[in-house]
Every structure is written in C-alpha cells, then in structure tokens.
Image: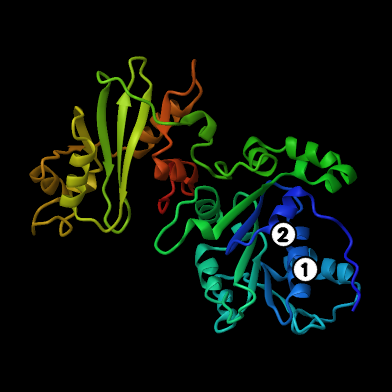
Amino acid sequence: MKLYLKGLPNPRQAEFFASRARHTAYGGARGGGKSWAMRRKLVLLALRYDGLQILLLRRTLPELYENHVRPLLAELGGAVPYSASQREFRFPNGSRIRLGYCAQEQDVYQYQGQEYDVIGMEEATHFSEAQMQFLTTCNRTVRADFPPRMYYTCNPGGVGHAWVKRLFLDRDYRGSERAEDYRFIPARVYDNPVLMQRDPGYVRTLENLPEHLRRAYLEGDWDVLAGQYFPEFRRDAHVIEPIALPGHWRRFAAMDWGYHDPCAVLWLAVADDGRVYVYRELYLRHTLSSEIARRMKQLQQGERIAYTVASPDAWQRRGLADLAGQSIADSFAAAGVPLLRADNARVPGWQRVREYLAPADGGPRLRIFSCCTNLVRTLPLLRFDAHDAEDVADGCE
C-alpha cells in the first residue's frame, strides 16, 4: 500500500508527535492545529504498528463527522477503507481507527469491556472527569511493542476545564497519578504558520473577542472562563514566589471546615500599607478536627497568630469531632486552637475579595504565595450562581 500524507507538522505539533508520555495533551488557544495533529498522530501510529486498536472521540456525533470522518476520508484518499456502519477505518496491516462519541454522560458505557491501545479525546474539556476516568479503564494492552497511551486536545472552558487544568497545567496529582505520566504541549494560533498564511484575519477575530474569551482563545489562559466569579484574578499579578515576611506584620488564619469536602486553612499577613499576603495553606480531606488542629499548631509554631476565624458550621456540626457531643469548634479549643466565628454573609465577603484582587497603585492588594497551590488552583474556578448573580455557585471546590 502506498499512502502519501500531505502536510508537515509545525514545531509544536512535532513535539506532540514525539511525546511518549502515558497521557499527552496538546492545545490551549484556538487555531493551534489541534485536530489535524490528533488525526495525523493516530494515522502514523496505525501505519507503524500492525494491528493497533485506536479509539478517537468527540463529544457529539455531528462534531465527530465534521472534524474527523470527512477530513480522514480526504486525507487517506481511499487507501484505507472506511466502514460507515462501524464508524472505523481499517488499515491493511490490521490496525483500525474507530470513531466514537459521548454526547450524554452515560454514553461512555458503550465502551465498557472494550480494549484500545490508543485513545484520543478531541476537545477533552467537553468531557467530564468521570468520562475520562472510565475511558482510562479501556486504554489497556497486552502488546510488548507498544505501551497504552492517551492523547488529548483542548481549549480552556467547558465541563472538563477543571480536570484538564489540574492534571496538565497545575500538575496537581492525587492517589496513584504520577507526574511523569502527564505532558502538556501548549499551542497558540501563532504556532500555526499554515493558518496564519491562509487566514491572517483569524488573529484579529480572536483579538476582538470579549476579554475573558480573548484571554482563553488567543492567549491560552487557563485561569479565565465564562461565568468566572473573579475575572480580576491574574496569575502573573497575584501569585508570587515566597518572600520573608517582617515579624511585626499582623498575622491571622482563616478556616473553611470540611470533612468529606476539603478543610481549607489559610494563613494571612497584613503589610504596613494594608496589602494582604496569603503565605501558607493547609488542605485536607477526611481528617479529624484534632489532627487538623495539631497540624496547624505545628505549622505556625514560633509565629504570633492574632486569631483564627472559621466558618459558622464549625459550631453546628457534630459527630466529626473526637468526643461525642462536641462541636468542631470545641474540639479545636481543646487542642489549643481557639476559633472565632466568621461573618457568614457570603456576598459582602466575596466583594471584599474582589476589591483586594483589583489593580491598585503598586499592584493588587492581595498577593498569594505560589506554595498555596490549592488556592491558586481553585480561585479562578469559582463560578457565578445561576440563581444569584452576586453569589458564588455551590458545588465549587
């Protein structure tokens, strides 16, 4: 079989082709040539390895047809037969590329029990984390010459924004996830010379978008998305490397109690000019109050902490403290960390945070140390409540 594939990869696409990571994601901004890169990578793998089983996914069937079936028919020029009923290209060497979709959450179960050496998730942020996790169970092989791999293309936004950002941008790994298994290759429209030459006006189109879309689609900024509660947050403006804090600055701690949900503790220092520095965090799940108090005392040893405020539910919840009948606040007090009840007026509190994020003379009034990784990760993910335009939606981490 002779097959002439037209087109050469740009440098970013070549990086994508060369990656041998277990999970490789490519993209960020619009116009980076993601779909072509995904198709070409899978075709090259199918040609190189006899009998390779490949699954290529889009969220919906119409997207799948327009973005991949039609282009593959043109690119392969009839050299590789296509079965419309099975939605798969069958290569003479026994390899096949099956094309699938997951329009509804439960559609992912149509792949239960199936085995694929390679899975490609196009526009991965359109898939939920649960769908991604289920698909990883289908990505397995007994081949000695090829380890299982998954490839992803993505833009900021969508239902899967948080998990893609966590794994590939923030590199925040949990459980058995390993950093060496994940690689992200950023791409912007400027990295795609073919598009820049054929449609130079596309850049102007992206430049004319509303700010949050321009930052996402032109700059590939993962810290902004539609419905974002704090669009003022900019990683380059608000996140700094840790510095030595003067001993006379007033320091306090703030805790949002949780057991099944995360328990988050932040330590803050107020500078002489009124700027606030978040310099430490503690972020735990399924941990008893006495252990959290012990960890707090250990972390702040030698510091003068003026007070620790906590969400009012620390005085209401029972059964998660060490002694029956104790509230969480009682348990903390017994451990030597007395708590002050915070004002639970949510909207005024959010507005205060917004004021501190806003630009000011000499920079924003709120700075966050880069070691506070969970705060940096979750702050830009907070969304507006659909029923209250002034509040943050419930369910945000």
What secondary structure is found at the residue carrying circle 1? helix
Q: How crowded is mark 1: few (under 14 residues within 10 Å), some or many (20 or more)?
A: few
The answer to whether residue 151 is visible is: yes
Out of 118 and 282, give the one closest to the viewer.
Answer: 118
Q: Quadrant of residue 368?
A: top left
CA gap between label 2 and label 1 equals 9 Å
Q: Is residue 309 left or right of residue 228?
A: left
Q: Quadrant of residue 346?
A: top left
Q: Which amino acid does label 1 sit on?
A: Leu
Coordinates of residue 348 in the picture (x, y in percent): 37, 33
The answer to whether residue 389 is visible is: no
Query: Which residue in the structure is indicated by mark 1?
Result: 44
Q: Quadrant of residue 388?
A: top left
Out of 129 and 17, give the one closest to the viewer.
Answer: 17
Residue shown at the point (10%, 40%) measured from the top left: 336
Instruction: Count how many numbered circles sit on residues in the image.
Output: 2
Q: Is residue 49 left or right of residue 127?
A: right
Coordinates of residue 73 in the picture (x, y in percent): 86, 72
Coordinates of residue 197 in the picture (x, y in percent): 88, 43
Residue shown at the point (38%, 26%) measured from the top left: 243
Query: Which residue in the structure is indicated by mark 2?
Result: 17
Residue shown at the point (8%, 45%) measured from the top left: 334
Q: Is residue 36 above or below residue 246?
A: below
Q: Is residue 134 above or below residue 259?
A: below
What secondary structure is found at the residue carrying circle 2? helix
Coordinates of residue 113 in the picture (x, y in percent): 55, 84
Q: Which amino acid does label 2 sit on?
A: Phe
Identify the image's colour scheme: rainbow, by chain, secondary structure or one colour.
rainbow
Q: How crowded is mark 2: few (under 14 residues within 10 Å), some or many (20 or more)?
A: some
Residues marked 2 and 1 touching at CB (< 8 Å): yes
